[in-house]
Structure formats: structure tokens, C-alpha cells
Image (cartoon, helix red, strand yellow):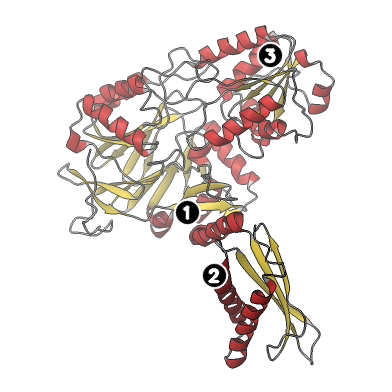
Amino acid sequence: MTKRNKGASPRQPGRGKNKKILRVIPLGGIGEIGKNMTAVEYGGDIVVVDCGLKFPEEEMLGIDFVIPDIQYLIENRDKIRGLFLTHGHEDHIGAIPFVLPRLDVPIYGTPLTIALVEHKILDARIFYKPRCNTVHAGDTVSAGCFEVSFIGVGHSIPDSLALVIRTPMGVILHSGDFKLDMTPVGGAERTDLASLAEVGREGVTLLLSDSTNSERQGSAVSESIVGRTFEDIFRRHKDRRIVIAAFASNLYRASQVFSIAARFNRKALLVGRSMISYVELATRLGYLDVPDDLIVTSQEAERLPPNRSIVLTTGSQGEPFSGLVLMSKGEHRQIRLGERDVVVISATPIPGNEKLVNKTINRLFECGCEVIYERDVAIHASGHAFRDEQKLLLCLTKPKYFMPVHGEYRHLVRHSQLASEMGVPQRNIFVTHNGDVLEIDHSGKARLGSRVEAGAVLVDGVMLGEFEGSILRERKELSENGILVISIVIDSGYNLISEIKVDSRGSIYGFEGEDARPEIAAAVERALENARSGSFNVPALQTEIRKRLREVIGKNYRAYPGIMPIINTVRPDRKNRRES
């Protein structure tokens, strides 16, 4: 495992004697689950692989999701020859509505992936028309000095691809998300092992491979096993309503649910905006074959007895406003859960979501439901390769260099150890961080010798960008210590003309009480004295009031609330004006 020398002065890409160096630049998806994005650069050409998001961590208060920092791509926008997508999951395409309009580059993906991208851009209500290009497994696209070929792989969503990027320095193989399911659900793709072996015979300079399940021994469970488990659940609970929570994008799972529901003479109700969107889109494009009368509306479902309906819903990850979570809280408009319901959580928690999922399960039990969620019950099949499948890919492709991607840091390390066991020399294995640049020169030697900016951009309705640190700090302070509001009315000479009003919210300390009021009033008066003796404007006075109040609070209390001064000015020649 090769690591960058942290003491070395990083060299910026594009500088040095020989600019024609192949560079592989992970901008997301390294040391984390989600936010996948990688750039490949040679001379004046760049191709980008994927553009995903990830869910926020617990301390990211109020944040909707996190996307890659694309500053390096913006600075090199003219070099980008295309954005190539491996498949249509959110962690690979979710950031596109925020990123693509800023780059305005051609985009390449399979029919389902492109349809999902177009739907996301339309749903985001941005006035941007993407330059979409539809590709299929077996196709090859020229992009500057690169040639990109596509190999079909098995995953939990149709139309998934591995990318073969032919460069002047050799072949880069990007596995995308893959698994080797030998008994897939009817019509599902198998990973094209023959094409992968052919690329291996051609010679793979660098393999970038999915590391998500590098800690799990053996091979991933087949999706068909999940179907047999569902059949058993339907058979054992013939007199109860069945609620199944799954990823909306897992169309193979949805296909099995619909097929089994039809055989057991049940109707299906879809809950959750993304679930409805994915099913409608996949049905329209022919990826799902759903009988016309199988899916019912919420009004029709209410008229059915419990044993004649099933509910397919979002919320398998405990997302706060998803269908299952609202049901567990008793806040869903149509569905009330109780003792006659069986809830199946057909997913494993994404790292970081465990608490949310556990809280949802606890609430479901409180509703009186039977909940099936245990890992030892085959109610979920991962779409990511386990260790034996990762070994087979290494064996087929025989890469000179290896770089694990798509996983937390421990997953990357475990995958690198696996590559070493499979014969890749330790010096040829690179465990990286987002922003590290893997360089391969004309002599064929690889090294980690540079970095680019590659952080995270937080999204709360809009992109927060460089402001996320201060915003999150404020939110954290408010959540922990509450807020103190000081309202004063002054004249143009900064003299108080009415009583100071004090109010607080979310604080355990009684700042409005008689004991605290004299010290607060004295602190405000000191701020006004300073204002009268200097050239203060209203914002400067607000800052001074905060400073003086923090001095008082620091002496008497153990925590600082957020302090919000509201200043009303009254001038003789004008009507009252409020400034805050």
C-alpha cells in the first residue's frame, strides 16, 4: 500500500517538464460511501466518471445531501470531453442537477441512466438542457485522446456498466458497482466476464474497483434468493397487510414484489415520491412489466381488506420524511400501521444511517407491527461484490496497478490487501484520499505526487459551498445552547428610549428572569456608550452588544447561546424604522 508523503510539497497538476502525464483524480467516493466522482486527465483532455451525492452525517444539521467539490473541474472546464455514468443510482448521478449546468459538458449513459438524469434535471426545475448521449454495452466512444468502451455488469439496477478507458498510457478499467450474480432475476444482466477477460488479455494498466463489500467473505447473495424469501413471507402472512421498504432504484426488487403480489392475488400501493417516479419511468421504458390493474391508488387501497394489499415504500434507510418513517410516527396521510401489519425492511443500513434505521424499527414495534429486518433472513441482496467476486475480477484483469474506490477507508485497505494476496505488488497498490492525484508517466511508473482541491459541498435547498462551516457552526450552537434575543429602541444619538426586552428560546438558563436582567442591561448600556464615543453604525453596534453580552454570560453560565440583537431606531425627521 503506497501513501503520499505528507511532508512533501505538493506539485500542481499540469506543471513540470513533461505535461503529458496520465492523471487519475478521485474527487469523491474515496473513504466514504457515496459522492462518487473520478477524473482521468492526459494533456489537454479530461473525462469524468460519475457525479454522485451522499447522505449527510448526523452532525450536518438540516443538510439535505452532500456533493463533490468540483472546483478543479470548473477551472479546467475547457478540457472536459465528457461525463460518463456507470449506472443510475443516486450516489453516481445525484449531484448532476447541481454540477452539470456549471460544466456544460456532454454526458454519456445507458438508456435508463440517461432517462433518470433527464428526470432529475426536470424535477430540479433548472433551465438547463443536458447534452445526453445514449450508449449500450459493447459501444465505444471517442473523447479527445481517450476511447471509452462499455461492459455490462450485474448490479441492483438495470443498465449498469464497467468502463474501459483506453489512454495513451494504457488501459484503465473502472469496475463501477458490480456483482457476479449467476442466477439473476429474469431479464437481469449478468456481469460480462468474457469481455472483462478480453480486456485483461489486452493488458490493464490500472484497475479501479468497487470496495464496498471488501470485508465480507464469499459471494453476494443472488437477488433470486430474496424472491424466495418474499414468497415465504407472503405465504406465512396470508391474513395480514404486508409493507415492504426498499430502495426506490432497486427495480429488480420491485419486479419480484409485483410478481409475487400478483400470484397471491394482492394489489400494490406505491408510497414515496421516488418510488412512484422510478416505477413509472421503468415501466414506460420497458424495464418493468407490471399488469395494468396491479398498482392501485391510496383511495382504492383503503377499500381493500388487509390481506389483499401490499405496500411498497421508501424509507429503508430511515430517511426523515420517507414513507416508512412517516408511517412509524403515525404521520402518514393514508396509512396507519397496527397489529395486522407485517413490515419488511428489505435493505441493510448504509454506514452512518444505522441510528436512523434503528429508531424507525423501534417505532414500528411500538405501532404493534411485526417487523422483519434481521440480516440472517435473506430479505436483501447486496448489489456489490464480496471478496470472492473481487478476487475473480483481479484474476481476470491482472492489473499492473490497483486503486480501490467506492468505500470507507477500511474497505479500501481491505481491498488493497486482497489485491496483494492476488499477486499485485505492494508498491503498485495505491490507497488514496479524495483529491490525491495518481500519476503515470511515459516510462510506465506510477506515483502519488500531487493534490487538487476536493472537499464536499453541502446542499440545503441550495449549494452552501464555502459557507457551510459557519452555517453548521451556528446550527450546532443553536441546537445545543438555544438563542438569546435582545430588543432595544434607540434614538439617533444611541440613547435608550424604552425598556430593554429580553427573550430566549432553547436555553436552560433563565435570561428573562429578574436575576439576569440587571447584568444584561448593564452590558447593553456599555455597548451603547462605546457607540456614542465612536463612529458606530447599526451592524457595528450589534457586534458590540454580542461582545459585551458574551462577557457577562461567560462569567455566570457554562454555555453561550446564540445572541441576536434587534435594534429599532427612532429619528425625529422620519417614521420609526427597524434595523436588525
Q: Which of marks 2 and 1 is in front?
A: 2
Q: Residue furthest front?
A: 515
Tell me the element at label 2: helix
Q: In which quarter of the image is the N terminus?
A: top left
Q: What element carries label 3?
A: helix
How far apart are the alpha carbons under marks 3 and 2?
A: 66 Å
Residue lying furthest right: 303
Q: Is residue 353 above or below residue 459?
A: above
433 to the left or right of 177: left
Decide: marks 2, 1 in contact (CB < 8 A)?
no
The amino acid beneath tag 1 is Leu
The residue tagged 3 is 261
Q: Position of residue 449 (x, y in %)?
A: 23, 51
Q: Which amino acid does label 2 sit on?
A: Lys
Residue 555 is labelled as 2
Q: Residue 293, how many percent across, how many down?
A: 76, 18
Q: Is mark 1 on a helix, strand or loop?
A: helix
Mark 2 / mark 1, whichever is N-terminal: 1
Does residue 195 lie above or below 408 as drawn?
above
* Closer to the camera in the image, 327 or 515: 515
Q: How crowded is mark 2: few (under 14 residues within 10 Å), some or many (20 or more)?
A: few
Alpha-carbon span between mark 3 and mark 1:
45 Å
Across and down, in percent, residue 323 comes to 68, 33
Instruction: Between residue 272 and residue 276, name the one nearer to us.
Output: 272
Around disc 3, counting alpha carbons within 10 Å, would you say few (fewer than 14), some (14 to 19), or many (20 or more)? many
Q: Residue at x 18, y 38 (%)?
A: 427
Place of residue 381 in the rendered image (x, y in percent of width and height, measured from the top left) = 50, 20
Circle number at residue 103: 1
